[in-house]
Amino acid sequence: MGQMEASKERFKLMERVGGKLNAVGFHKYDPLRTGKPLFLDVADSQYDLREPSRIVFTYNPATNPGKYGVGEVMDDEFKKHAIMKAPWDSSLEFYVDYENDLLYLPNGENRIEVREFSNLSNVKKTITTGITGITGVTLDSQDRLWAISSRLRGGDGGLYVVDKETPHYCRRKMMLGSPTSIDSMRITPWGQKIFVADPFNHRIVIVGEEGEQLGSLNTPYPTGIKTLVDERVIISSGKIPTHVDLTIISGGLHNVGTNWFAYLTDYGTQASNRADAVDFHKIMIQWFLGFQEVELPLRKEIPFVTILGTGIYNAGDLIMEKGFSSFTPIFVGDHGSVYLSKMSARFTLEMMEPASSIIAGHKEDEWIALSNAVGRCKIEAPGIYRVRVREKFTGRAWAITI
């Protein structure tokens, strides 16, 4: 698609969400001079599973810039909306309880607002917890409320269960790096699992409802996780400054006996806060100024960059980004290359030994040294990789993959 065609498609997108010029980058300009836009930014958008033509989304309203809004689009028309007391934050995501027609909206601090999902203006209650920095919540198969505490919002990085009757009493089930997204598989046959995106450890963590870790998935900078009723899982990247333009769709994130597995159903060069889907033909992404539907399969011919790290590394160190807690994994769907800024730097390329899919290692990940290289090397097979330096290295490393 050429630049002119892409511009036309983008304009069509702006037109379909409630009129012309509703979602352009007006955060840089005066919204009052640009044709009365409806919103300036979007954080999360989800299909209504009961009526997929209805999309509910959270946004930065043009009428009250800096506030936290929730609205709905029905048959491409902006229908209803409500403005909450919480300040706007693009890292916040919501959870829908279809069985009880409830919408859970964390405010980034210690409160969760509960609204009627079919009538967004109706506030049912506000849950005030003893947790700080809540950016995402979910319900499990026992109807218990789980929450993540984001270090980016002053939290402790914990995964909690909130007692609905006495919400100040919260049980921390697990400590993570800085979780950014959470969802559950409560209404599927496998059920009883919580999924958490932990980008500072480069992992999707699968947790049982008793707080036990069932498995994890290595993927670069995962910031969004969404489970679908057909048991697929969409992994997105985009909510933190260092991200990768990659969306992965996986199935079968289950534990089987003492092992677990995953399989790759689709991937492509596409950034999103937290993608959603209702069928096998398209997904919905949120990226900066709005939301849009993207046809499946995703585009794979566009290369994307993964920043592996910048800093000082000693011999034997795995390359990781400053401020992160784990090495940076490299996702390769077809082929790629690794580059170090110092052309004489010696390093080893290691590959995760796959158990059942190129994205799924054994329960205890096993890595094999594939090749020693100097400065750069090519990757010729799909899989998950990492880089280990063989001598002291100061500089930057990155991968370009397809």
Image (cartoon, rainbow, N blue to C red):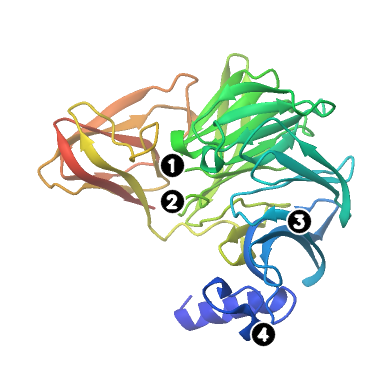
Q: Are marks 1 and 4 in contact (CB under 8 Å)?
A: no
State the image quarter where residue 148 is shown: top right
Which residue in the protein does label 3 denote? 84
> Does residue 312 show up?
yes
Percent coordinates x, y for residue 74 in the rendering: 82, 66
Q: Are marks 1 and 3 in contact (CB under 8 Å)?
A: no
Q: Earlier in the sequence, mark 1 or mark 4?
A: 4
Q: Earlier in the sequence, mark 2 or mark 4?
A: 4
Q: CA distance from mark 2 to mark 1?
A: 7 Å
Which residue in the protein does label 2 denote? 244
Of the two numbered discs 1 and 3 in the rendering, the one whose residue sits closer to the viewer: 3
Q: CA distance from mark 1 to mark 4?
A: 39 Å
Of the two numbered discs 1 and 4 in the rendering, the one whose residue sits closer to the viewer: 4
The residue shown at (71%, 43%) is 228
Percent coordinates x, y for residue 158 in the rendering: 58, 28
Q: Are marks 3 and 2 in contact (CB under 8 Å)?
A: no
Which amino acid, by three-letter code, is at mark 4? Gly
* Picture disc at residue 35: 4
Percent coordinates x, y for residue 288 in the rendering: 56, 63
Of the two numbered discs 3 and 4 in the rendering, the one whose residue sits closer to the viewer: 3
Which amino acid, by three-letter code, is at mark 3? Met
The residue shown at (39%, 53%) is 402
- The mark total stands at 4
